[in-house]
Amino acid sequence: MINFVKEIAELLKEQIADLELQEIESMIETPQDAKMGDYAFPCFRLAKVMRKAPPLIAKSITDALEGNHLFEKVEQVNAYVNMFISKEEFVTDVVKEVLEKGADYGKSNVGEGKPVIVEFSSPNIAKPFHIGHIRSTVIGNSINKIYDAIGYKVTRINHLGDYGTQFGKMIVAYKHWGNEADVVAEPIKTLLGYYTRFHEEADNNPALDVEARETFARLEQGGEEETKLWQWFREESLKEFTRVYDMLGISYDSYAGESFYSDKMPAVVEELKEKKLLVKSKGAEIVDLEPYGLTPAPILKSDGSTLYITRDLACAKYRKETYDFYKNIYVVASQQNLHFQQLKKIMELMGYEWAKDIVHVQFGLVSLEAGTMSTRQGRVVFLEDVLNQAVAHTKEIIKEKGVATDNIDEIAHQVGIGAVVFNELSNNRIKDYVFKWDKVLDFNGETGPYVQYTYARCASVLRNAGEELAKKAASAEIKASYITSPSAYELAKLIYKMPAVIVEAGEKYEPSILTRHLVDIAQGFNRFYHDEHILVDNEEEKIAKLSLVTATKYAIKNGLALLGIEVPERM
RNA sequence: GCAUCAUUAGCUCAAUUGGAUAGAGUCGCGCACUACGAAUGCGAAGGUUGGGGGUUCGAGUCCCUCAUGGUGCACCA
């Protein structure tokens, strides 16, 4: 496919000797309003080097570019050079490219196979998997897919919260009041019940806390009974998590959680001591980060036991040794900002230059209308319930609309789950939001179902055209002059832009950039669909238009796949 | 108190990282189903980009300051 920006930059370079090619390339813009051209070049910055008024520079560049086969028209407006690409050439190029690449359209190799780790979801064992967990889970999944698509070698890790003093409490509670059958029937709700009961009883009975600490100590030392119980809790919890992951179509390369690093901590602590970073303070062993504007990081408690950050230090080292990562990405809430700042700083102080490759992809808080979520106060919405509700709601709509299908369950699943995921990936990660049922279940406007509907519409047109024509549209030479109308051309431009959008979404760890672009493509198609009749009598025209429909279909399908969303052929 | 993130149309959010007249969706209003799917499209309306300074050819974007809100501030994870 022609790289227009590059081609234009080379043409401009002939006119502007004072700037580097790369700089010129970065200055080329695509105007917000199509009336001002496909590409624009602002000349303000040239005024100083060229010692001429910007509009005059723009004029001379415009004159020089005019007549080049690449352009249909070149205009000077004030300090801007507005360039209009030759439409037929452009549309032919885009459609051909998409049809050739098919399922691979949108992929690239900017990563050159470099290894990247994405840690995401990472729920705590024996705690409910609620709507707040959707963020890390869905954003992380998408970042994985995007990095894979732009040529990195990704490793997907679920860093389970399966370690810490809380498990001492859990084991004690189970031994006092537990029942095996209840745990098997409903693991998380039951275990959570034990956990809250422990806290209630411990308020009046401090002996329980002592017992919990001792129990955890035995667990750390590999005590047989404790280990067995802990493993059982872990397995049962994981079964519940997996149910949700299956619904979302998510899988992992590794479930190495916190406990995995328990035997790797002593070495790191030793290393910190050797490098004289560890100091004693108020009974604990800490790393003093005050010179760097951070609060001190405790590494060992007064009783010598370890902490969350101790494990994360061991974890980062292990990952570097095991995967030799180019980037180690943590998709974790912004609340843990300080933790990751400390982690990076300590790695840096230890002399690891790759500390800079630790990336904290943070996101805002999800709350409920009643306030922030609190499992103890029963103020919580379970993710599984949201997914099930969305699927059920979709099923009703499908019935209502009388969609002719014999796999209503599959479609309801694709659309219902897709709606929830798309909604999550629509906004900037950093924004806080309040979960509202009617918003998740609203399928009009800029939503997942809207984009999926557009896909189904493409599929429908191609079905109506018949297999033979659809095949021709996917392979034959097309008469591009039939698809250069404003709406067809705008649609082609949006499809052309998608691979670059995917790279940008990856570089910024921001799937919403892709989500929004898919809405643009869907809007572009629906406008085209309304403006023009596709299945006309003239066969050449029909095939040309169908090829654009086919290209749109691929773009939407491939794009949604990177968000972790499937597409229905009808809905 | 310190740190940090946010604040853009009634509501939910964009804005090519300093560029042209700040754009979408939604709510409400007015239209369009006897063409290929109305989970759609079109039109009108809606703005002192939280306030105030500054930097420059040019600021929603960068700097300072104030206000409001979220989050975090050593032995939880």
Image (cartoon, coloured by chain):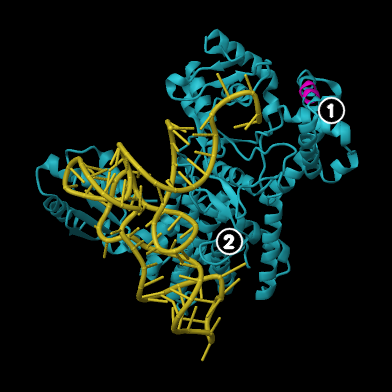
Chain colours: A cyan, B yellow
The chain holding disc 1 is: A
Name the front one of labels 2 and 1.
2
Q: Nearer the viewer, residue A106 or B39?
A: B39
Place of residue A229 in the rendered image (x, y in percent of width and height, measured from the top left): 83, 30
Residue type, mark 2 in image: Lys
> Label 1 is placed on what type of residue?
Lys
Q: Main secondary structure of the magenta part?
A: helix
Q: Is residue A505 left or right of residue A33?
A: right
Residue A270 drawn in magenta: no
Total marks placed: 2
In this image, B13 relative to A60: left or right? Answer: right
Q: Position of residue A364 (x, y in %)?
A: 53, 44
Residue A128 relative to residue A495: left or right: right
In the picture, the quarter occupied by the C terminus of chain A is: bottom right
Give the residues drawn in magenta, as a range: A210-214
The residue lying at 48 percent from left, 23 percent from top is A345
Give the answer, above or below, for where A508 lies relative to B20.
above
Protein chain holding label 2: A
**Height in image: A534 above or below B58?**
below
Viewer-nearest residue: A68 or A246: A246
Which is more N-terminal, label 1 or label 2? 1
Structural distance between the alpha carbons of marks 2 and 1? 44 Å
Q: Give neighbour class at mark 2: few <14, some 14-19, many 20+ (Cα, 10 Å).
A: few
User: Where residue A318 is drawn, which disc sits there?
Assistant: none
Q: Secondary structure at mark 1?
A: helix
Q: Give residue A192's position: percent from left, percent from top.
A: 77, 40
Residue at image mark 2? A439
Quarter of the view holding residue A259:
top right
Q: Which residue is mark 1?
A: A228
